[in-house]
Image (cartoon, helix red, strand yellow):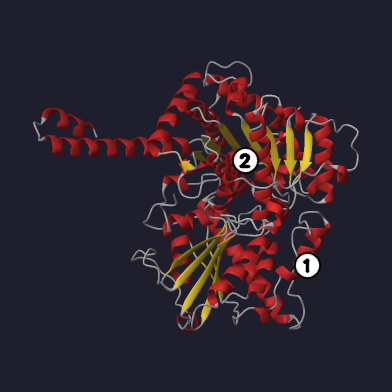
Amino acid sequence: MTHCVCLLRQLNVMPCRKSLLSSMVKFVSIRCLWRDAIQTLNTLQSNAETLAKIASTRDSRRHLNIPHMINYLKRCDIEVPDLDKLQVIHISGTKGKGSTSAFCESILRHHGYKTGMFSSPHLVTVNERFRLNGRPVAKDLFSQYFWEVYNKLDTTKHQVEGDPDARQMPAYFSFLTVMACHMFLKENVDVAIFEVGIGGEYDSTNFLQSPVVCGVTSLGLDHTSVLGDTIDKIAWQKAGIFKRNVPAVTVPQPPAAMSVLLNRTKEKGASLYVTPSLDSYNNGESVHLGIAGSMQRYNATLALQLCRIWLDNHRKDFSKRKWICDQSDLHDWEKIPSLDGIVLTEEMRNGLSKCYWPGRNQVLSRPGVTYYLDGAHTIESIQQCMEWFLQASRKEASKRKGRVCRILVFNATRDRNSTAMLSILKPLNFDAAVFCPNLAFTGTVSNTPDQINRTVTKEKQLSFSQVNKKIWDQINAQSDETPQSSNSTTNKPNIIDSAVQNGALNANQFDLNRNNCNSNEIPSEGSAESHAFPCILQALYWAGQGRDTNVKLPTDADIPPISDKLQDSTHIQILITGSLHLVGGALGLLNPDLW
């Protein structure tokens, strides 16, 4: 790059060539700054050994997380009250945080406001986590803000007194959270939408003291090693973002969760409301959503109410008071006030219908193969994914001639219930299933820096794939030994019944009998064929039989032969699910230009 700059200064070239060379230098400079920023950012990831040590002391030190975050902000010349300028919408929950955030952002952007949004994880590149007016921040702007924050934190890390941990650089997610605050303040956004990382009470985003409104999406069992293994423990953590004299809105939750949310509301002096059904808007007329899937109806109505409160507050200085009510004497969760559906403005309708959120109920069509991508990784989200895929794949298959086969591409990490998730997917009778880690490439090809994960070793990731394959094989073997009657509802895994009983799955949100299909409903013979691959590229190539020209194998790749039954199909439907990181790696191969 230095050589290019010197050449530009010294050579007496024609203006047009000078302009071209200047553009080349700028391009190289941006790439270098971006590459260096991502490589430096990755050094903030905790490795597997460090995470194990942290886990052993988490309960005794997690209360320090928020004070540390405040310290990091101060080292970047940001005081917590400064963040009130951002007019924050703060969103926690188990599933749907990202989609709800995306709906909120789209609605308010269509109202003409400048929006900032911070979410996680990213799918392909890390700048996706930061959105300005609905678009991921440009790489050159990302690099600028990254180095501004990194250099301030690096030069001040030895000037802090007290806890030695506070003198260090923040961990990966904490750093990005500080960077989001810095970016949104510099960009002077009208509204900043913050999605909680994990939990709420001790989450790195919970230094926000005066959000305009807080939201809680659907709750379920996830990150149980950190948040607790029951729905009431999960709810306690998620409600940790509630603040005094700040309205909070939740979608309908299991009774155990609603009771905890109410108790936390009284403890923190907040005001809690429940969203109405999406059918109650527009006088019962249908509302079109830009994101597919039945659960999006819950996310959309939550987003509408969060934006409704935000708009009220933004337009009238005194209006926030009308959303604050004393609930200290409220003891029955069924008495929590329900909000009413409203007639949607054109801006609200456009915000919902034009919302784009890749990796969630997403379809990519190519000649001979269709990819169905959904980052579902909990029991309830896999249940919804199954329903969506069944409906969408049927509709597509009905329009095609010849035999259509189905392939499952799956991965789930060590802290997920793979047995439950795969049991829910089994009734779809895939022709084959393939398993792989969240690694796009292996062997002589390198993964992009944005996809590097130091928190778990490559060997561990490969072992998880083998375990998932064994679980799938066992489920198929048990199914073969105990055939279901053709008129049963069935093939419904017992895990779903128990999930409803313990509150992890809300029976009111899902028609379990309807969503769990029987073999007569699916035009597929089904098969127990399964394979484990060392990377996403090989898994997709085998699943698609090499039909997609975007999926090209290196010459040294060795994959098993494709069965005659799969080769004879006229079209292949591939469901990719179980992990957002898996979906992100797949999209990086199939459609790297997401935005």
Q: Is residue 230 above or below residue 182?
A: below
Instruction: Quickly name the residue at label 1.
Output: 494
User: Considering the numbered disc 2 on the image, is that residue within a helix, a strand or a loop?
Assistant: loop
Q: Report the Cα–Cα distance between label 2 and label 1.
A: 31 Å
Residue type of the residue flagged with mark 2: Gly
Quarter in which the N terminus is drawn: top left
Between 324 and 221, the residue placed more toward the observer is: 324
The image position of residue 494, as x and y in percent, is 78, 67
Q: Position of residue 562 (x, y in %)?
A: 46, 78
Q: Which residue is mark 2?
A: 197
Query: Between residues 321 and 175, which one lies in front from this camera angle?
Result: 321
Badge 1: how crowded within 10 Å, few (<14), some, or many (20+)? few
Determine whether, in the image, residue 264 is placed left or right of residue 136. right
Using the image, determine if residue 198 lies above or below residue 329: below
User: Does residue 384 appear in this view?
Assistant: yes
Q: For numbered disc 1, what is the local secondary structure? A: helix
| Residue for point 61% across, 45% down | 345
- The reply to whether callout 2 and callout 1 are in contact (CB within 8 Å) is no
- Residue 287 on image: x %, y %: 63, 55
Residue at 36% from the left image edge and 67% from the top image edge: 549
Residue at 68% x, 62% y is: 383
Residue type (three-letter) at the residue carrying disc 1? Asn
Question: Where's residue 401, x and y in %?
Answer: 48, 82
User: Going from the N terminus, do you reach mark 2 or mark 1 first?
Assistant: 2
Task: Characterize the local packing of mark 2: few (<14), some (14-19) or many (20 or more) Cα atoms within 10 angstroms.
Answer: many
Picture quarter containing residue 36?
A: top left
Q: How many marks?
A: 2
